[in-house]
Image: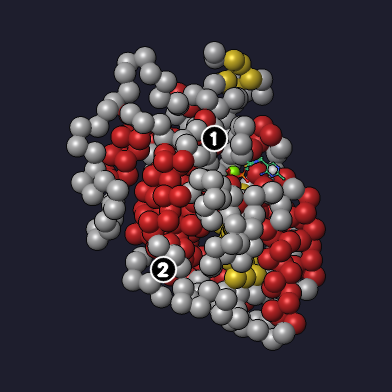
Amino acid sequence: MMTMTGEQLAWKIRRHGVEMTHLSCGSHIGAIMSVADIMGVLYAEILNVDSNNPEWEDRDRFILGKGHAGAAVYAALAERGFFDVEELKTHYQNGSRLSGHVSHHLPGVDFSTGSLGHGLPAGVGMAYAAKKDGKKHKVYVVLGDGECDEGSVWEAALFANHFRLNNLVAIIDHNHMQSMDFQENTLEIEDFGMKWKAFGWNVIEIDGNNCDELRSAFKQADEYAADDNHKPTVIIANTVKGCGVSFMQNDILWHYRFPHDGWEYDQAVTELHKIKPEGVEDIYTPNGIENPEFPMENDDVGNDHTLTYTWNTTYPEKMRRVEAKSGTGEKEHRI
Ligand SMILES: Cc1ncc(C[n+]2csc(CCOP(=O)(O)OP(=O)(O)O)c2C)c(N)n1
Ligand SMILES: [Mg+2]
């Protein structure tokens, strides 16, 4: 096991994510920030893997179904010693092993992803094989909530229940957003937990940006899995897309946009420094940004790029483009 805590690794993943997408002009920073705590706890505290022996037969298997957040996997693997942290700077570059979406050409990666909907089916196959062979390792799959629009996810869910794959844990990064909009405006999926329950899974619902809740969910999943007749567990991790940088949070712009030179990069790093856990070093900007740029008065700080009305009435006003007319069920355009 590594000496870092889940919180410390999650912070590192966020900081690497900002740097990697900034350097490469790559995308999906919102998705990386959303899943950072899940990945931090998994790679610092839960997964039984060995960087000296990446192909170790009894290792826990991990698949990131939402492969567009691959930078989070790369950062976690590098910090866990699978390859040099320096290599993270090659992310998204021609010829790099660190392609934009997760690639199995890297040590520690069990399955390439990027085309949504393949992670869980592959993980189910791995869990099925392990169970048949009497192996004791576990299989963890992280999915996006938008990814759950794919029919293949639900076929895999049926199979996993039928074969009592108690060695399988799915974690859903439930940030209520996908690439263009909030989830409920794209394809309604609530009541999400009930759906998984109806497919036979053991359902645990938590705040997925809270490492303590994640730890306790993994513990509960382990305890439940002790009975070989038990079913797979799904952890519905309620998260915030862009979590950790205020102007990225819940703003769909940051699904594709990268932190540009100037105030976007400066403020992202400055905000991350404000929440840096004790004992963590920032290898890129050890003391933060000395004279950070701020947005000009008329700059677009990206609070209002969501297309529509909100799934969550507690959203700040400024985050909504369209307001629900109270009581009527109608939606009124504010802009
Ligand atoms: C099969 C497939 N269709 C479309 C895409 C394009 N795409 C990339 S990310 C994304 C949204 C994914 O949303 P979600 O799973 O909720 O992930 P999040 O970024 O919110 O964590 C889409 C549609 C894809 N990668 N694969
Ligand atoms: Mg999502």
The image's mark for residue 155 is none
Residue in the picture at 24% in, 61% down: 279
Residue in the picture at 48% in, 53% down: 72
- Classify mark 1: residues with Cα within 10 Å, few (<14), some (14-19) or many (20+): some
**Whether residue 306 can be seen here:** yes
Q: Residue furthest bottom?
A: 134
Q: Could you tell me which quadrant the C terminus lies in?
A: top right
| Residue type pointed to by label 2 | Gly
108 in relation to 191, above or below: below
Whether residue 317 sits left or right of residue 127 in the image: it is left
The picture places residue 260, in percent across and down from the top left corner, at: 40, 31
| Cα distance between the residues tagged 2 and 1 | 29 Å
116 in relation to 8, above or below: above
Q: Dot 1 corresponds to which residue?
A: 256
Residue in the picture at 77% in, 54% down: 152
**Whether residue 207 can be seen here:** no
Residue in the picture at 57% in, 64% down: 109
Q: Dot 2 corresponds to which residue?
A: 81
Q: Quadrant of ligand 1?
A: top right
Contact between labelled residues 1 and 2, with CB atoms less than 8 Å apart: no
- Classify mark 2: residues with Cα within 10 Å, few (<14), some (14-19) or many (20+): some
The picture places residue 156, in percent across and down from the top left corner, at: 76, 61
The picture places residue 62, in percent across and down from the top left corner, at: 58, 66
Q: Could you tell me which quadrant the N terminus lies in?
A: bottom left
